[in-house]
Each structure stands twice: as structure tokens, then as C-alpha cells.
Image (cartoon, rainbow, N blue to C red):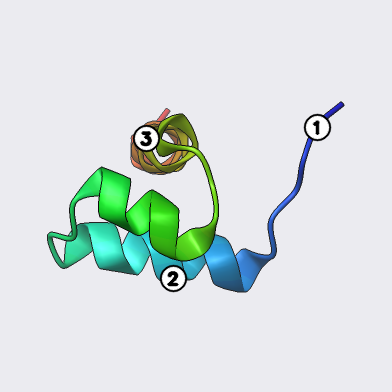
Amino acid sequence: MAHFRSRETVESALRMSDEGVDDQVNAEIHGVALQTIRTWRRTRTIRSIPG
């Protein structure tokens, strides 16, 4: 079963990543798994590449 986070949570976590916050700290702040932070970053990167 998939778990969905609010857009605000995802955007906040990505902003913190952009600001250099460590992934583990970022995950703890947002109440998600470390891998979730990494997946969100990777997905954003993949989607921003022109197709």
C-alpha cells in the first residue's frame, strides 16, 4: 500500500535538500524514511530532464 505525503511536505523536504540539509536529518524532520527523501530528489531530477 502506497503512502502519500502532502505537496507541502515534499516541497519543504526538497527545499531543505537544496539548502544542503543532510538527508537523514531531513527525513527525521519530515517524518519519512531516508530512502523517501532520496526518491523524491531523484524523481524531481528525472522529471526535469527534457524528453
Residue ID for mark 1: 2
The reply to whether discs 2 and 3 touch (Cβ–Cβ < 8 Å) is no
Residue ID for mark 2: 12
Q: Is residue 9 above or below residue 25?
A: below
User: How far is the residue under mark 1 from the one under mark 2?
Assistant: 20 Å
Specify the amino acid type for callout 2: Ser
Residue depicted at x 56% and y 67%: 9
Residue ID for mark 3: 38
Residue depicted at x 69% and y 56%: 5
Residue 47 place in picture, x, y as percent: 45, 38
Specify the amino acid type for callout 1: Ala
Specify the amino acid type for callout 3: Arg
Residue 44 place in picture, x, y as percent: 42, 43
Residue 2 place in picture, x, y as percent: 80, 32
Determine whether the residue tagged by mark 2 lies in a helix, strand or loop. Answer: helix
49 to the left or right of 51 = left
17 to the left or right of 34 = left
Q: Is residue 16 above or below residue 36?
A: below
Residue depicted at x 44% and y 70%: 12
In the rendered image, which quarter contains the N terminus? top right
Quarter-of-image position of residue 45: top left
5 to the left or right of 44 = right
User: How far is the residue under mark 3 from the one under mark 1?
Assistant: 16 Å
The reply to whether discs 3 and 1 touch (Cβ–Cβ < 8 Å) is no
Residue 49 place in picture, x, y as percent: 34, 35
